[in-house]
Image (cartoon, grey):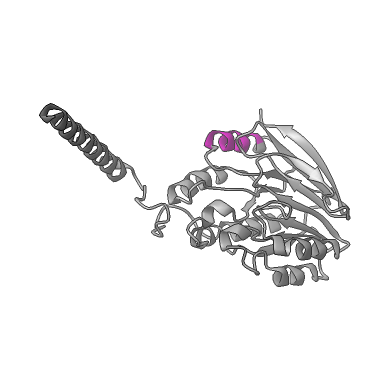
Amino acid sequence: MKLISSYRLHGSQFRLSVLHLFLFIGLLFFNSCDKFEYSPYNDNRTGLVETNLNRKNIEKLLLNEKNDDDTVTIVYSGDTQRFYKGLHDLVNKVNTMQDVDLFVVCGDISDFGLIQEFDWVVRELKRLEVPYVCVIWNHDLAAGSNAIFTSVFGPVNESFTYKGYKFIMHDTNGREYAFSSDVPDIHWLSKQLNDSSASWFIGLSHVPPFDMDFNPALEVPYKNLFSSQPAFIASLHGHRHNTSDSYYYEDHVRYLTSNSAGKSEFLLLKFINGQMSKTIMPVE
């Protein structure tokens, strides 16, 4: 019995020693990593990433609005989370393409909401030779706050009009707000769709209304709002990591989801006189 007790004691001590060793190695790793936070939701953003990037890119886009070309061409992709090599290749591909007006990301920029993840992705997006915008995603909201996104990219609900097309970027991550009655913000969306200065309307958000992470109580009001505007062309989403294209509610609104950046293809959308065409493009 003494031998068994001694063995158990030494086994416990060995496990504790191994645990302490791993904790020590972990502390060394985090202390040595440049600009790496101990907390995934550390709010110290100084010097890591830029701010208000959506608005800066929208202003860049609008500088081209007076061009004679009446076609709006969009490269549209979904989630970039962890797919840094895929995003790098996608940016390289877009930079070889002609007449692209805008690059749209409708998906998770980060996986855990780490500042470093934002920094990595922004570094890639800044290599683009065309303007880009990003909509808010559910992974940034895991801590119950959109502070990081709003600092880096700007308001979660924002719109702009380019060549007669009003792009409405909005938050549809209902589950992350415990299915709050104001996500998505139907009142704000209604005001955007009543804009008489726009000829057509395009929605940009992360979670599609037919997904389980969308607030089920708002699915019908949401889709009814879009279908009530005859000039609403398409609703673009990410989240599902695959491509889909349908008139889901059997009205005139076309709902699309896009592949993640980890896949070898992306969507090229062209808008001409209020009509949209779609081409699935290879990254290579």
**Residue 183 in the image, given as x and y percentages of width and height:** 64, 65
Q: From the viewer's perspective, tell me whether residue 183 is left or right of residue 273.
A: left
Part of the protein shown in magenta: 84-93
Q: Nearer the viewer, residue 102 or 134?
A: 134
* Residue 45 found in image quarter: bottom left
Picture layout, residue 22 above or below residue 192: above
**Residue 271 in the image, given as x and y percentages of width and height:** 82, 49
The residue depicted at 70 percent of the width and 42 percent of the height is 258
Q: Nearer the viewer, residue 196 or 65?
A: 196
Predominant secondary structure in magenta?
Answer: helix
Residue 89 lies in the magenta-colored region: yes
Quadrant containing the N terminus in the rendered view: top left
Picture layout, residue 98 above or below residue 173: above
The residue depicted at 50 percent of the width and 61 percent of the height is 144
Picture layout, residue 121 above or below residue 188: above
Quadrant containing the C terminus in the rendered view: top right
Q: From the viewer's perspective, tell me whether residue 125 is left or right of residue 181.
A: left
* Residue 219 found in image quarter: bottom right
